[in-house]
Image (cartoon, rainbow, N blue to C red):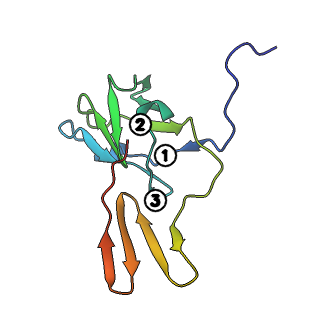
Amino acid sequence: MYIGRQQLGGPIAKLDDISSEFDGIKTTFNVSLGATPYFANNPFALMVSIGGVIQEPVAAYTIVDNTIIFAAPPAVGTNFFAIVLATNAMTPLKSLSIGTRNSTEKLDIHGATFSILSRTGKIPVAFNVA
């Protein structure tokens, strides 16, 4: 019998190893999944281990876009892994067509950069990712 919160559905994934970048000075690292930048919703969506010690979200690290920022720089030679705990089984959105029958604009989504491709060129779109 299982006692606890219902587990969320979706794939479980291990992020790419970034330990080769640990130099004892840097605290900011890009994260990826299969060499594709990975954008976590928040630090609680990941289980991060440095040197075999599970790190506490927010206190030990935070996430901004596809970047993990550690409170203290990981030492050279320290191992790392991160497991994605909260995902959904949906395919990431690459583009979205919006408009009417007479005119259609294409919204290109590349990580955190948005623009609308129109007949007159690209139109930048401002947004806030929370």
> Where is residue 62 shown, x and y percent of the image?
34, 33
The residue at which mark 3 appears reads as 36
* Amino acid type of the residue that numbered disc 2 sits on in the rendered structure: Phe
Q: Residue furthest right?
A: 1
Q: Is label 2 in a helix, a strand or a loop?
A: strand
Looking at the image, is mark 3 or mark 1 earlier in the sequence?
1
Q: Nearer the viewer, residue 118 or 64?
A: 118
Q: Name the spot of residue 103 as percent of width and height, x first.
A: 50, 82
Which mark lies nearer to you, 2 or 3? 3
Identity of the amino acid at label 1? Answer: Leu
Query: Would residue 126 appear left or right of 13 to someone viewing this image?
Result: left
Q: Residue at x 32, y 83 (%)?
A: 121
Give the class, few, some or many, for how many residues have Cα within 10 Å of label 1's Cα (few <14, many ≥20): many
Q: Amino acid at mark 3?
A: Thr
Q: Secondary structure at mark 3?
A: strand
Ranked by sequence position, the earlier of labels 2 and 3 is 3
Quadrant of image for the C terminus: top left
Q: Which residue is mark 2?
A: 80
